[in-house]
């Protein structure tokens, strides 16, 4: 990018060459790194040791031109960093745009998220704040939008009378991978469901926007999130949690930790489109397979026609491959019954850019459609807050590594409903 310069700020007493050498070693270890592009970027990258105070950031005073401030910091420092930048006048757009990127987690509950929003808005406007949710930069998520709104015949089908339930799953075989300091204080509900999976729910449940502009998308997503039926206090029958066997022995995990490594929710969106359709959200670690998808379970035909033939599915795959599957029923060659036939679409090649690259490019473009708004974040926290309160008591169910997760996740399903299998043992 012509004219791009990168300035890294940190408390470590490293020399600039040390920082650049560390970056280069990391990039060389990644498959597909364009070393020529890195050589160009290295010449544009500097490092400055600094404290997150107006005095410590004096070196930024007088900054001219466009600027993006990326807060890749411990969450407790977000407000402090934004305040220091604001006091120095760096939020003011006298010579170019000024944008603030805030990594997750954006708060730990509704009250803390509201407090953080107020702190950021002391100096930055809402249209200057980009709350990072890299799922919205995934090709598969953009394909969900493109498929849904690019094929008009799907519009009458994308309704409660043709869809029995929606499942949104992100399952991982990995464990903590060195993230115990963060994860043991967060858990699966805060780490995945409140942000990533809630955004996917909004994209599935929302009404079609008049145009795919950032403002229209945000407004429609907010409508869907605000239409989610409140989870009753205690969350019985609406939430399930688990912890994989051996979690408490992981390095950095506190003794007797009650942090969930698996979380599942049942939600209802009380709007005209999908009222009465359960949305099942789940995510967990140390599960049977790496699987990420959004699945619409299509309504079955009356049994009097062909017997119990089951349901078709429309599945948008995010991991480990991307694409979509549409499973329908047709005549079997072996007899008079019906059998499932799956139509599969897979892109010709892998996406050229990662989700984070797409998100960063959206920041430079000023495309807020890739980022949740203040109101969306608070609406999502309002949905999960009753679960967080309920889980202050009791223990998560222990489940075996490499399994489908805790058995209690089956108990939140409506009669006749089922999770798509991950391929593990109980």
Image: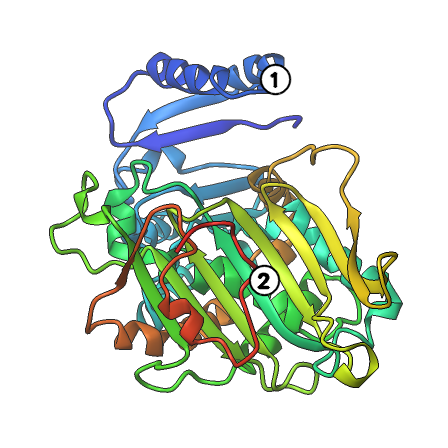
Quadrant where the N terminus lies? top right
Q: Position of residue 209 (x, y in %)?
A: 75, 71
In this view of the protein, which residue sits in the foreground, 276 or 70?
276
| Relative image position of residue 38 (x, y in whole percent) | 56, 17
Q: Badge 1: few (under 14), some or many (20 or more) residues near its Cα, within 10 Å?
A: few
Q: Earlier in the sequence, mark 1 or mark 2?
A: 1
User: Which residue is drawn at the image coordinates 39% and 56% (left, top)?
Assistant: 426
- Mark closer to the observer (1, 2): 2
Residue 11 point in image, percent of width and height:
25, 32
Q: Which residue is located at x 18 percent, y 48 percent? A: 248
- In the structure shown, which secondary structural element does the residue marked by tag 1 occupy? loop
Quick one: which residue is furthest to the front in this view? 335
Q: Is residue 285 above or below residue 16?
A: below
Secondary structure of the residue carrying tag 2 is helix
Image position of 160 with respect to 348: above or below: below
Residue position for label 1: 34
Quadrant of the rendered structure where residue 17 is? top left
User: Mark 2 packing: few (<14 Cα in 10 Å), some, or many (20+)?
Assistant: many
Label 2 belongs to which residue? 200
- At horizontal 61% and vertical 48% (from top left) the residue drawn is 318
Above or below, comparing residue 39 to residue 118 in the picture: above
Q: Is residue 267 visible?
A: yes
Image location (x, y in percent) of residue 221: 62, 70
Q: Which mark is residue 366?
A: none
């Amino acid at each position: 990018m012509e004219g791009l310069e990168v300035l890294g700020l940190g408390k470590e007493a490293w020399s600039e060459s040390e920082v650049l050498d560390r970056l280069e070693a990391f990039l060389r270890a990644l498959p597909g790194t364009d070393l020529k592009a890195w050589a160009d970027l290295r010449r544009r990258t500097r490092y400055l040791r600094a404290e997150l105070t107006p005095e410590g950031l004096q070196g930024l005073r007088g900054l001219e031109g466009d600027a993006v401030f990326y807060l890749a910091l411990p969450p407790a420092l977000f407000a402090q960093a934004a305040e220091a930048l604001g006091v120095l006048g760096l939020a003011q757009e006298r010579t170019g745009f000024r944008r603030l990127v805030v990594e997750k987690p954006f708060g730990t509950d509704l009250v803390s998220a509201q407090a953080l929003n107020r702190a950021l808005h002391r100096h930055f406007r809402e249209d200057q704040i980009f709350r990072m949710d890299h799922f919205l930069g995934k090709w598969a998520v953009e394909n969900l939008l493109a498929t849904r709104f690019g094929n008009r015949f799907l519009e009458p089908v994308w309704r409660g009378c043709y869809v029995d339930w929606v499942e949104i799953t992100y399952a991982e075989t990995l464990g903590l991978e060195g993230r115990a300091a963060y994860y043991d204080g967060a858990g699966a509900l805060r780490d995945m469901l409140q942000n990533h999976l809630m955004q996917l729910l909004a994209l599935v449940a929302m009404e079609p926007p008049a145009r795919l502009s950032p403002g229209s998308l945000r407004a429609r997503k907010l409508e869907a999130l605000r239409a989610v039926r409140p989870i009753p206090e205690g969350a019985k029958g609406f939430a399930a949690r688990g912890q994989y066997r051996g979690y408490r022995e992981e390095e950095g995990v506190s003794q007797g930790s009650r942090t969930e490594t698996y979380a599942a929710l049942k939600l209802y969106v009380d709007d005209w489109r999908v009222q009465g359709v359960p949305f099942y959200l789940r995510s967990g670690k140390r599960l049977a397979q790496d699987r990420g998808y959004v699945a619409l379970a299509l309504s079955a035909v009356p049994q009097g026609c062909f017997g119990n033939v089951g349901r078709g599915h429309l599945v948008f795959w995010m991991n480990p491959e991307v694409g979509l599957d549409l499973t329908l029923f047709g005549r079997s060659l072996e007899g008079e019954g019906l059998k499932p036939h799956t139509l599969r679409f897979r892109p010709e090649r892998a996406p050229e850019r990662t989700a984070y690259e797409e998100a960063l490019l959206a920041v430079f473009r000023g495309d807020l459609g890739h980022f949740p708004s203040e109101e969306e974040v608070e609406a999502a926290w309002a949905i999960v807050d009753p679960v967080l309160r309920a889980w202050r008591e009791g223990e998560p169910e222990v489940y075996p590594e490499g399994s489908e997760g805790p058995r209690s996740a089956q108990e939140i399903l409506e009669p006749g409903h089922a999770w798509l299998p991950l391929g593990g043992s109980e």
